[in-house]
Image (cartoon, rainbow, N blue to C red):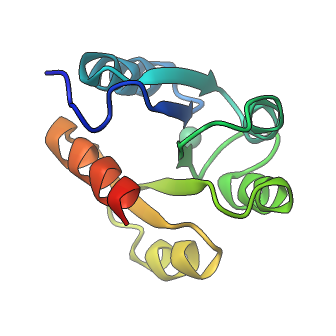
Amino acid sequence: MENEFLKGRKILIVEDDLSSRLYLNKILEKAGVIILNAGDGQEAVNVVLNNPDIDIILMDIQLPVLDGYSALSKIREANKDIIVIAQTAYGLLGDKEKIINSGFDDYVIKPILSQNLIEKLVTNLKR
Ligand SMILES: [Mg+2]
């Protein structure tokens, strides 16, 4: 369902697992989001450098080339204000503190449910 608050926003999905990426694309497409994709941390950095108008990055933590933490720190060198939400696997409880201490704005736990994701994005945009 199209979301009035998310419609026309630009969101970068960083995810190396193809089926997870397609799943997230489907949810955000329905909401009316303009979607960019990256399959590893370095690609994410490059996409951000080329697209300074991204509203939110949805960043997987376990990624090839550069992991989510390293990609975030490079992205922060270029853009301190962009909202970056980590995607973390269920059960990795120790990750939560590390994620917030590393400068992510928020996190979502996999498997990601459509309604939770939409709410999380809207909440962070309204902050
Ligand atoms: Mg991954």
Percent coordinates x, y for residue 124 in the rendering? 38, 59
Quadrant field for ligand 1:
top right
Left or right: where does residue 110 sit relative to residue 106?
A: left
Residue 55 in which image quadrant: top right
**Residue 3, quarter of picture:** top left
The residue under the point 65% across, 36% down is 53
Q: Is residue 57 visible?
A: yes
Q: Residue at (49%, 82%) from the top-left corner?
A: 97
Displayed quadrant of residue 74: bottom right
Residue 49: percent from left, percent from top: 83, 37
Image vertical order of residue 16 relative to residue 96, above or below: above
Residue in view at x 27 percent, y 38 percent? 5
Taking depth in this image into account, of 4 and 11 the one nearest to the observer is 4
Q: Quadrant of the N terminus?
A: top left
Tell me what residue is drawn at x 82 percent, y 40 percent: 65
Q: Position of residue 115 (x, y in %)?
A: 15, 41
In the image: residue 73, left or right of residue 111: right
Q: Is residue 99 positioned above or below 13 on the image?
A: below
